[in-house]
Amino acid sequence: MSYFALVPAAGSGARMGGALPKQYLPLAGGPMISHALSVLASHPRIDKVFVVLAEDDAHWTSYNWLPFAGRLKILRCGGATRAESVRNGLAAMADAVGDDDWIMVHDAARPCLTHTQIDALIAGVAEEDVGGILAMPVADTMKRGIGGAIVETVPRTGMWQAQTPQMFRHGVLSEALVTLSPDITDEASAVEAIGLQPRLIEADSSNLKVTYPFDMQIAEWILQSRAGPA
Ligand code: CTP
Ligand code: MG
């Protein structure tokens, strides 16, 4: 049984704004996507990293990917939604992987992932398990709002914020993603919808998703502080 990574990177970064898709924005010395790819491709348990790009992606080839030689496989099969990109990627990689192999799906927009977090996910998802995700217990009080006013305080007991990587066997994940609905916002929700219960592996807030411009500053700080003084 092997481990593979699948990185959906076919989004446009609408909430970030700007012409350059978010995954290519300059961050800590490289395009944002290079950070997650570097961590995944250098992890000793991960055999290969599959990257899903938009069919018409004109940016990927402007960077030097030679340092990753042999570790990356580029799939130009991005879809209209993240779930569609993942589903297309799973289909495109099917010849190279077995049904029982583990696929770690990780957003290009989470550049601060570490080997320690990957190790925790692998260790936390035992062989017989359906799979699992990195996640963080919700710390803030949760409100449901309608029209700008609070209509309900939602108890946060048992509430988690889902992160990536999310790790499932190729066969299970492919089956779960056969039917896509707007409720499928991550791999776990698709797997839940076929009646399975993925494990929650506690992570930390350093594995943030970069969505808005301010998130870039936090990610830059995290990456620079790990690199140590220049
Ligand atoms: N993604 C993808 N295909 C899509 C949409 C998103 O592969 N059709 C990828 C993004 O490139 C990103 C990850 O899924 O790596 C998480 O998505 P998100 O953070 O929402 O990125 P975008 O969809 O690009 O941003 P936005 O929603 O603000 O447009
Ligand atoms: Mg999006």
Image (cartoon, helix red, strand yellow):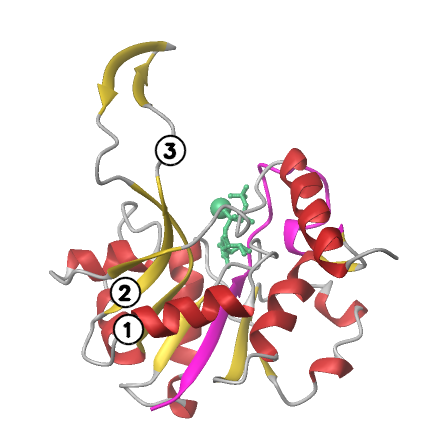
Give x and y (percent) for residue 108: 57, 59
Q: Is residue 65 above or below residue 218?
A: below
Q: What crowding class fits label 1: few (fewer than 14 Cα within 10 Å), some (14-19), or many (20 or more)? A: many
Give me the residue at 57% from left, 41% from top. 211
Give x and y (percent) for residue 197: 17, 60
Q: Residue furthest left?
A: 195
Whole-number angstrom distance, CA of label 3 to CA of label 2: 30 Å
Q: Secondary structure at mark 1?
A: helix
Check residue 139 in the rendering and tell me which mark sits there, or answer none.
3
Considering the image in quadrants, where does the N terminus appear?
A: bottom left
Considering the image in quadrants, where does the C terminus appear?
A: bottom right
Give me the residue at 57% from left, 53% from top. 109
Classify mark 1 as within 8 Å of ligand 1 or not, answering yes or no.
no
Residue with the mark numbered 2: 177
Q: Is residue 14 above or below residue 171?
A: above
Q: Mark 3 or mark 2, which has the lower sequence index?
A: 3
Whole-number angstrom distance, CA of label 1 to CA of label 2: 5 Å
Q: Is residue 78 visible?
A: yes
Nearer mark to the viewer, of 3 and 2 = 3
Residue with the mark numbered 1: 174
Task: Point out the stretch of residues depicted in magenta.
Answer: 1-26
Whole-number angstrom distance, CA of label 1 to CA of label 3: 33 Å
Q: Is residue 87 visible?
A: no
Discs 3, 2 touching: Cβ within 8 Å: no
Q: Is residue 225 magenta?
A: no
Inspect the image, locate mark 3, and give the three-letter code of the amino acid beneath it: Ala
Discs 1, 2 touching: Cβ within 8 Å: yes
Inspect the image, locate mark 1, and give the three-letter code of the amino acid beneath it: Ser
Give me the residue at 37% from left, 33% from top. 139
